[in-house]
Amino acid sequence: MSTGNFYLDCVVRIGASFLCGLLFGLERKQRQHTVGMRTLILISMSCALMGILSEYAATGSASHSGDPTRVIAGVVTGIGFLGGGAIMRQGLNIRGLTSAAVIWTSAALGLACGAGLFIPAGIVLAAGLVSLVALEKVEWYFFPAEKTKTIRLEYSGSSVNIELIKNVLVSSGFVLRDVNLSRSLEKDRTVLEYFVKAPAYADSLEVCRRLEDTGALLNFTLSD
């Protein structure tokens, strides 16, 4: 394969991996899952780059003694443990997924540069930076609900307008995931716990004020 055809093939492969990661990311964000577009795009492109690198290392040079793909496989395994260490759980939320994907992509870029595949590495680098910077704004615009939180409402008595509560939360930008209801006959209290995806702009005081019209509200808690 000529040099021009080789790089054109690299562009097609990386472009296809970008599209695959984007589409899967859109599907996950529409369902309000933690993994988003940027994370899956980085993982998809870096894996495509590693695939190109493995093929190049195995067939692109006759000067190698031994199997160069063994080194690549060792790096991939090691960097997987390193990236996994960047992922942590905080309350109901998982943090560090994008950072782990960046670590993975950086490893792929380093391997590609070490093999002299500067053009494919540059394509992945440029597309990755665009994904991290530009798509962050797109995600925040179309999918503002990010953090998983718990809303705990405690009412006096049993006269609680659940449908009105739902309308207040949804109109305030919350995405409802699940709800638990408990009733204390001894204390005559009704407790509702909503597990929601909360937008960054949510005004807790305003939400509490609106919920006061849904029944005899005693306590309102919004927590991670």
Image (cartoon, grey):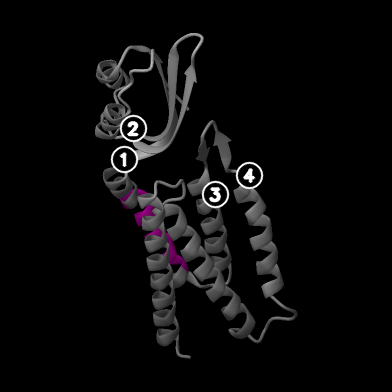
The residue under label 4 is 85
Q: Residue 153's quadrant in the figure?
A: top left
Q: Are marks 1 and 2 in contact (CB under 8 Å)?
A: yes
Question: Which is more N-terminal, label 1 or label 3?
Answer: 3
Q: Give the residue type that dot 2 points to.
A: Ala
Q: Secondary structure at mark 3?
A: helix
- Nearest to the eye among marks 2 and 3: give it: 2
The residue under label 2 is 200
The residue under label 1 is 144
Q: Give the residue type that dot 3 points to.
A: Ala
Residue plotted at (62% across, 48% down): 84
Q: Give the residue type that dot 4 points to.
A: Gly
Q: Give the residue type that dot 1 points to.
A: Pro
x, y (%) of residue 99? Answer: 51, 46
* Category of crowding for the residue at label 2, using alpha-carbon neighbours closer than 10 angstroms: few (below 14), some (14–19), many (at least 20): few
* Category of crowding for the residue at label 1, using alpha-carbon neighbours closer than 10 angstroms: few (below 14), some (14–19), many (at least 20): many
Q: Is residue 168 left or right of residue 95?
A: left
Relative to the observer, which residue lies in front, 161 or 166? 161
Q: Secondary structure at mark 2?
A: loop
- Measure the C-alpha gap from mark 2 to mark 3: 23 Å
